[in-house]
Image: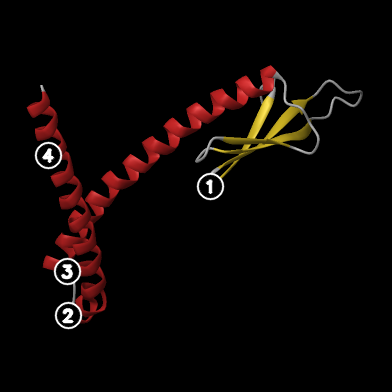
Amino acid sequence: MSAELPEYYFRTRENGAFVFRVDTENRQRRIEMEQIATVNIRNGQVKPQGNRDLTDADMRAISDWMQARTRVVEARRLDDILRTVDHLNQTAHWANSDATDAQLEQVTDSLLLAMHDLRSVLVRRKADQLLKASRDSAED
């Protein structure tokens, strides 16, 4: 563990974090963490804990963390989607070369429905993009 701890600790959760102020400046030199806020990155809400008033430094640290966390979550989400493409390719190979009839029977309907749903969404979104692009170019 490094000699110097950060001033704030963010205990992440699905849609944000609990924010703690880290304190080592006490008589016992123990690490104390006092919860000061709850953060929701989906709606940008910061709720102070109890009757606490957050300082400007608290809000700056929370805002900086929220921006950084949003970038991390977005990067992970995109990476998950790219992994899904890899899994779909592996699934196609498995279905073509290794799957038994019983295994295919077990997964085919679920896969076809999920792929149909995904295809419908992607086609609709692509059509919306093309329509918007043609409108935008017509306006220029």
Which badge, 4 or 3, is on the more N-terminal residue?
3
Measure how far apart labels 2 and 4 are at the Cα level: 41 Å
Q: Which residue shows up at 20% across the image and 75% down it?
A: 104
- Residue holding disc 3: 98
Q: Which residue shows up at 53% across the image and 44% down it?
A: 15
SS type, badge 1: loop
Q: Are marks 1 and 2 in contact (CB under 8 Å)?
A: no
- Residue holding disc 1: 14
Q: Amino acid at mark 3?
A: Asp
Q: Are marks 2 and 4 in contact (CB under 8 Å)?
A: no
Measure how far apart labels 3 and 2 are at the Cα level: 10 Å
Q: Nearer the viewer, mark 4 or mark 3?
A: 4
SS type, badge 4: helix
Of residue 2 and residue 11, the one placed in the foreground of this image is 11
* Residue 100 picture location, percent across and down: 18, 77
- Residue holding disc 2: 101
Measure how far apart labels 4 and 1 are at the Cα level: 34 Å
Measure how far apart labels 4 and 3 are at the Cα level: 39 Å
**Residue 62 placement, left or right of 106:** right
* Residue 31 picture location, percent across and down: 79, 30
Of residue 100 and residue 123, the one placed in the foreground of this image is 123
Q: Amino acid at mark 4?
A: Leu
Q: Nearer the viewer, mark 4 or mark 1?
A: 4
